[in-house]
Amino acid sequence: MLKNNLNTFIEHYGRKGFLTVLFYPFIAFLTTPVRLIQTLWHCRVLAEGKNWQCYPHFNPHSAIISLFYWTAAINLYRYGRSGKSPYLGLGNYTLSQLFHYSLPSLYAYWKAGAVTLLLGMFGWWTSHFLWLNVNTSLIGCLSVIFLTLISTFFYSHAFSCQNYNVLGWMFLPIILYGWIQGNWSLSVLACLGASFGSITVVFLACLLSIAYSLEILSFYPFLTIFPAGIKFLLHLWPYLSKGSIIKTMSNISKAIGLTNKKAKYIRNKTMGFVVSRIYRFVLYIQFVIVLFFITGKFPTLLIASFLLWVINSIYLRFADDQSMDILIVTVSASLLLASSNESIWLVVSYWLLVSPLPLLSGYYGFRHLAIVPELAPANILPILNEMQIFLSPVEKGSRILMAFEDPKNQYEKLFDGYRSLIDVPKYVASEKGIHLLPYWWEVIEVNYDGAPDFWGRDVGSVQRQMINWKTDYVIVYQKSKTELEKKWTDAGFKELTHISWKNFDTFFRGEFPFTEPVPDWWLLHKGKNL
């Protein structure tokens, strides 16, 4: 596999590619600040304070994915964490299963996505200025903080890969500062603040607190998590009161790859050391080694973070890649700032850590080898408006089936490679009071051996699934034909509306978030009166 990737690299970039990699640290230092200024300049549309919901993200692919969180948000907003939604899962979905969402940050991301990302990442960055109070090297401290700002890491997380969790990550530097300085009350408040932004941050901080408690032989770091933990129990209370937690935890365990026992859909390719992860592994381990030898202190917090990253990458996916990356960078920056060490080699090592090659950063849309792309707030309103028109014939309370091929029990093959596109109709359907399936929650709900499925694109399979799931409407797609195949009308289906994803080439900036041909969709109806 590595040999194939190397050959592809040579074919595409030639010898100049190797020279670019060699001099990349200098290229990034010169070009990333320019890109940062350009993208922030494009953000002036947000300064008007209007229509923030139209701009969920900066990366078009991430903007589409944001609708997944919008769907969760609109259902939680309407029915509450203790309620049930008729538009998720198989219907009558118990929303207490969404315990892992912090509502303040989820709603903020729903209503003002791009603004939330800017506040979160710049809040995370400015939190490091706390070290100016104790760092004996003003120039060294400011240098680390400045390098963090102009790094490809900061750029990719601010404008490409983060989500609602970013409002939790902004508190992690404060938590670490409180631990290292023995300011336990500050850490308590920061942990509690993080709990309103991200349960993932609280979970990872809890694991780190155990490691740090063992290092300093004190229970205080671990105890600082307790108030945030109590708040998290409030999320779980609807579960505990209804006795549904065991079933839900079983479903989640299968979804994240903790167990494949009796699972219908299994993760294969998302786990393991792909090239981008091997590259980040090298960057992380080099900083661990340099920090240890120059400071002479065993970096327990960083080693613990690194081990969590390895476990998450290979064995158990309990967090997204971007969450593990920002965890390691935050811990690395805090330990570096706490050391007050002015070694140029330590600073260089840190710069390599926080400025990975864009091509190998692992985030969609970063296709250039050495220079991050120029981005801008992505206006998703035109797509939502077209989808509203597309689904307009469907009555409130109806069900729609989307026709996809059988994924053969593999998560990676779900939705035929168009997994990012289905977030659009799912959100619009939820907004209109329509149940569209299948979607991620439906798949998780039937993720057991012998469970019913939703699959099949031929006429016979579609008709059978429409009867099974009691739907009168179906969305079918074609990859290269702009006219509906006659087989559908011959079978008694009536064409209602049509949408071509080619029309959104401008929004996606020429880079569609899938490798399959750009599809056309048709909404069909087959009722007793037709």
Image (cartoon, helix red, strand yellow):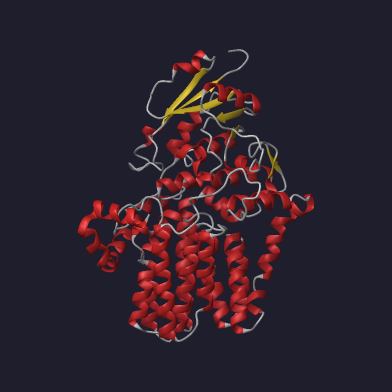
Taking the image as shown, residue 458 lies to the left or right of residue 527, namely left
Quarter of the image where the N terminus is located:
bottom left
Q: Work out whether 423 lies above or below 320.
A: above
Viewer-proximal residue among 50 and 348? 348
| Residue 159: percent from left, percent from top | 41, 55
Residue 34 vs residue 205, the one in the foreground = 205
Q: Would you identify the image quadrant in which residue 24 lies?
A: bottom left
- Name the spot of residue 3 as percent of width and height, x first: 33, 56
Identify whether 483 is placed above or below 349: above
Q: Is residue 54 visible to us here?
A: no
The reply to whether residue 305 is visible in this rendering is yes
Image: 345 above or below 467? below
Q: Quadrant of residue 184?
A: bottom right
Q: Identify which residue is drawn at 58% across, 72% down.
A: 208
Q: Which residue is found at the position 61% from the left and 56% from the top?
A: 258
Residue 62 at x, y percent in the picture = 45, 48
Percent of width and height locating residue 418: 46, 38
Q: Residue at x 36, y 81 (%)?
A: 139
User: For the point 74% across and 55% down, which residue is it?
Assistant: 237
Q: Is residue 216 left or right of residue 47?
A: right
